[in-house]
Image: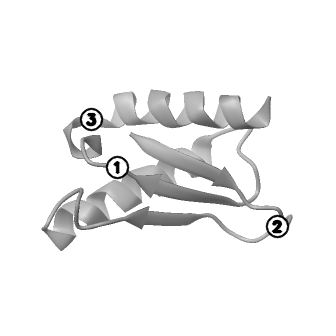
Amino acid sequence: MFVFVKKKKEGGKSIIAVGKSVSKKATERNLIKRRIRAVLRSAKNSPASLFVVAKPGVLSLNFNELKKEIENQINELTK
């Protein structure tokens, strides 16, 4: 559901991209971005800066499923 790329520079902020292939409605894309930001803020072992690309199908996940998915991806990145 996501593509994560750890940016080489330390510091900075995470970038979240949700394209029109996910949803044509801006309100739904913004909802996904807000949810992802909330999960990244609460993630304990999140790298300082990430580039996150949401893929189609992410809109069908509820918040808890989204959180588990993102945390699993971050754990894979930090190994």
Type of the residue with mark 1: Lys
In the image, farthest residue toward the left: 25
Q: Residue at x 34, y 37 (%)?
A: 63
Q: Tell me which label, 1 or 2, sits earlier in the chain.
A: 2
Position of the N terminus, as image quadrant, is top left
Residue 65 image position (x, y, % from top left): 36, 28
Residue that mark 1 sits on:
55
Q: Residue at x 39, y 60 (%)?
A: 33
Relative vertical location of residue 26 with respect to residue 7 in this rendering, above or below:
below
Label 3 residue SS: loop
Q: Residue at x 75, y 71 (%)?
A: 12
Residue that mark 2 sits on:
11
Q: Is residue 77 left or right of residue 65?
A: right
Residue that mark 3 sits on:
61
Type of the residue with mark 3: Leu
Q: Tell me which label, 3 or 1, sits earlier in the chain.
A: 1
| Closest to the observer, 30 or 54 | 54
